[in-house]
Every structure is written in structure tokens, then in C-alpha cells.
Amino acid sequence: MKSLWPMTTPKGQNKTSAKSALAIKLDELNQYKIDLGLDRLQLVIEQLAIASELPQIITVGGTNGKGSTVAAICSLLKTQNKTYGAFTSPHLFKFNERIEVNDTLATDDEILKAFNTIDEAKGTINLSYFEYAFLAALLVFIEHRVEVMVLEVGLGGRLDATNVLDADACVITTVDLDHTQWLGDTIEAIAMEKAGIMRAEKPIIFGASNTPTAIIEQAESIGARLYQQGIDYQLAMTDVGFDYVQSDRRFTGLNKPQLLGDYQIQNFASALTVLITLGYEFNTKQLNHALSSWHINGRLQIMNNKPLVVADVAHNRQSAQQLAKYLHDHPVAGQTRAVFSVLADKNLASWLGELVGEFSHWLIFPLNNQRAMPIDELKITLADDVGVLSQFEDGETALQAAKSLSDVNDRIVVFGSFHVLEEVFSSDL
């Protein structure tokens, strides 16, 4: 995916300059309301009369790894000379990041035109912020006549806006505890919600090991074609990369991706498998090219060197485990400091233990977000499990303090959510 980093305000320019027309329109929408259900959206899509214009659709759900898998699918599609549209969420710095066509973000004018079309079609129907974004993406993709649409599920699957369309194939990357207030408080309950994106006789790829029973049973119930890692396709890590085997296809000596973290190889394999099930054919050269060009912001992304600054959107148990494994497997000569904040609904206490011992100093700040964990609650939650703890007024100040304390052998990890990265990196490193 196209790199947007760093998105900086030119020195001397006032950050409070006049809002764009798109920003004004977005302010009218409720960005914090989650309103699951498909009935409203189905009515608006019928009014838009776009069903006959839709191209091939690939839907990507799961707890973690959705954005990386979407980006991998797009990177692979480019080797096939296929035009594509990618819908992802949330964004880091600007709404346009959610709607990408062939490596290019949708323009403000394209999005506003789509919003106007939606307003005309919806009448008195109330739509959520996410539903507006999703419908705008569809209209932009249709306008560009893309051959493939790759859609990232926002929340869950069964009742998510993206599920209003019948996908030709789908991926469920992983299942773990997250959004428990909406999806359930067990792995199997959450898996059942995510399994709602399956369609009869269509491929469904589960990208992690140990497929939840709910996914297996739902696939059997509706007649979806389930492909499981370790059963229907295999991965083998090597010193320099990995091998991939699926049926009679064997790709050996594939290079490691530029994206850090061994789990990204799992995401790439999911992307490759879903395209193979749709009839795409690849050779090793194409796969290595896709691996070398595969990029997504905010996933173990190196933002600065000396000291090393790493940005990651880890915000739940599974992603915290992945971050901890990376830090443990890649030690630095000096100290590792955390610049951190989190949303209140992320149940920090349940996964903080995954990261205890990985940081010598936690530098925390209050997020400027309605869903943010209050700073006093954040301090109390961290106090008994971390060593040195410092509080700052905002993310930029926390990062600058971490850098001033660090030497060339130290490492700073900025993490906690997309919102954390947006606030910390809103100006020059």
C-alpha cells in the first residue's frame, strides 16, 4: 500500500488552518457510534442500483492482521496486472486512506461526490460513519471500473457493513478476544460472528493454526470451502525466508517480506491462498516481487534510527503477544522505552502482562478521543506491573521526552492503537 509517512505539518504552518470541505462533512457524521446491522444499508444499496456493477469481491475479517492481509492481496493482484480497489479502516491521518484504487488514495472530490450520491439515495435512512465510508468506497471503485474489490471488515463480520455484499471469497485472519461488548466474551462466540462473512460454495481461508470449532461447523453447515493453514496449505520457515505448499503448488525459497514480524508471513500466505482458490496462478518471481513491494503503515514500522523508533498499532492480547515476541527476538544493546496510551474498551488489564518486562520506562499520555482510557485509570492499571512510569500532556511531548532520554543504542516503541500513532506522529519526528 502507498506510504503516507510522515504526514507532517510544515514548520511554521498553523495546524488549525481552515477545514476542508471533506473534513466539514465528516464532522457531521457520528464517528464514535457503532450501529451494527445490514437492513438500512441494504435499502440504500437498492436505491443506488449498483448491484449489477460490482466486480469480484474478496472480504477480509479477523481480529488482527486484516489490514496487512488486504495489502498483501493488493500487492499480489498487481503482479497479475489486475486493477483493484481496497477499503480499509480505521485511517491514521486522513480519511482518504480508507479508499485506495491501484495504489492511489481517493481524492477529496471523489469522496464528496460519493457522499452526495449517498445522501440523495438514502432519504430519511440514518447511516453510521462507517456505512458512509463503505458506500463511498463502493461508488469510487465502480467509477474507476476496478476488476477486484478487497474489503476489510470493520467489526465482527456477520452484521458488519461489508457483509451486505456476497463475497466471491473471504479470509478470516485470526480470532482472539477483542470488542467483547459487541461480539461475545469467548473465542467461539467471536469466531461465530466472524464466520458470518462466509458464503455457500465459496472459498473461506482461515489464516492461523487451531481453527475455532465455530468456523469449521459454520463452513460445513452452509457448504463453504474451508482452507486451513497446516491442513490445506502449509508454511515452513527457513533461515532466509519461507516455503509455501498448497495442493500441487510448491514455492520454495520465498524471501522474507520487508514488513517486520514472522506473523506477517502467515498473513501473506492467507492472501496467496485466497487468490489461488479464485483461479489466479503465480510463479516464484511474482511472489518475491509482491513480498518486496508489500507495505502497510503502523505495523512494526521503523520511523527513525539512532535512537530506533518503532510504531505499532498493537491494542489487544493477540497483537500484544506478537509485539512482545518481536521485541524479545530482536533485542537492542540499550534500553527499550514505551510511548503508550489506549482506548478504554480494549481491556488493557487482560493483556498488559504480555508486555511486562519488555520496557524499562513507560511514557504515557491521554488520548484525545471520546473512547480513551482516562489517564488516572491508565496510571492505576499500569502502576503495579511496570517499573518507571511518566505522564505527559500529549503524544508528541511523550515521544520527544523518550528521544531525549535515549541514546543511539536504545529503542522507543510507540503503540496502543491507530489513534496513538496519529497523535504521536502528527508532526516531524
Image: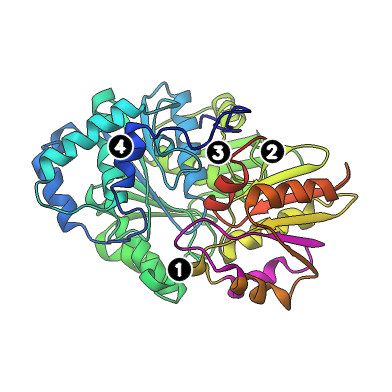
The boundaries of the magenta stretch are 348-375
CB under 8 Å between discs 1 and 3: no
Q: Position of residue 37 (x, y in %)?
A: 23, 61
Instruction: Say what amino acid the circle numbered 1 marks.
Output: Pro
Give the mark, 4 or 2, whose residue is nearer the N terminus. 4
Magenta region includes residue 361:
yes
Per the model, the C-alpha gap separating discs 1 and 3 is 27 Å
Relative height, residue 408 to residue 322 (above, below): above
- Which residue is the site of mark 4? 137
Label disc, if present, on residue 212 of the rendered structure: 1
Q: Is residue 99 visible?
A: yes
Per the model, the C-alpha gap separating discs 4 and 2 is 29 Å
Give the mark, 1 or 3, whose residue is nearer the N terminus. 1
Instruction: Say what amino acid the circle numbered 3 marks.
Output: Ile
Q: Say which quadrant the C terminus sits in.
A: top right
- Which residue is the site of mark 2? 303
Q: Nearer the viewer, mark 1 or mark 2?
A: 2
Give the mark, 4 or 3, whose residue is nearer the N terminus. 4
Magenta region includes residue 200:
no
Q: Is residue 202 visible?
A: no
Give the mark, 1 or 2, whose residue is nearer the N terminus. 1
Query: Residue drawn 36% across and 26% down?
Result: 107
Q: Position of residue 409 (x, y in %)?
A: 88, 45
CB under 8 Å between discs 4 and 2: no
Q: Nearer the viewer, mark 1 or mark 4?
A: 4
CB under 8 Å between discs 4 and 3: no
The type of colouring in the image is rainbow
Q: Nearer the viewer, mark 1 or mark 3?
A: 3
Relative height, residue 388 to residue 302 (above, below): below
Give the mark, 1 or 4, whose residue is nearer the N terminus. 4
